[in-house]
Amino acid sequence: MSESNPNRRRKTTRRQIAIDQPQWDRLETLVGDRRRSEVIRSLVDWYLREPGAKLPERPARQD
C-alpha cells in the first residue's frame, strides 16, 4: 500500500455497508461522490458521542 492511499493516512479500514441504491444515489446527488464517506463517519462519531462530534449539516430538502 502506498503512502498516497488516503485510507492509510487516516488509519481507517474500509467497511462495507448495505444501503439501498436509490438512497445511495440521492446521497451522492446531495453531497457528491467523495463526501459520502465523510458524512457517514460524522454520523457515526455523533452517534457514539465522540468528543466534539456534531451532526453533519444537511443540504436543503429537494423534493
Image (cartoon, rainbow, N blue to C red):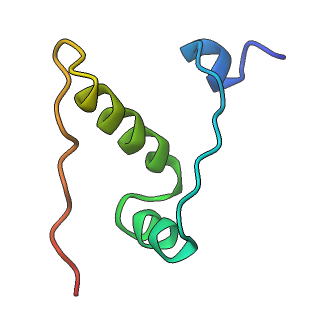
**Would residue 27 appear left or right of 33 to someone viewing this image?**
left
**Would residue 3 appear left or right of 26 to someone viewing this image?**
right
Image quarter of the N terminus: top right
Q: Give the residue drawn at x 44%, y 47%.
A: 35
Which residue, as the protein is rendered here, is positioned at the far right? 1
Which residue, as the protein is rendered here, is positioned at the far bottom? 63
Q: Give the residue drawn at x 41%, y 64%.
A: 27
How far from the left and from the top, in percent, is residue 34? 52, 48
How far from the left and from the top, in percent, is residue 39? 36, 43
Image quarter of the C terminus: bottom left
Q: Give the residue drawn at x 42%, y 72%.
A: 26
- Residue 58 versus residue 16 in the image, above or below: below
How far from the left and from the top, in percent, is residue 19? 53, 61
- Residue 30 versus residue 2 in the image, above or below: below
Q: Tell me which corner region of the image, top left, top right, bottom left or bottom right, holds residue 10.
A: top right
> How many callouts does the rendering have?
0
Q: Nearer the viewer, residue 63 or 1?
A: 63
**Would residue 56 appear left or right of 20 to someone viewing this image?**
left
- Residue 30 versus residue 6 in the image, above or below: below
Q: Nearer the viewer, residue 59 or 49?
A: 49
Q: Give the residue drawn at x 58%, y 55%.
A: 18
- Residue 60 versus residue 8 in the image, above or below: below
Q: Which of 35 and 19 is in front in this view?
A: 19
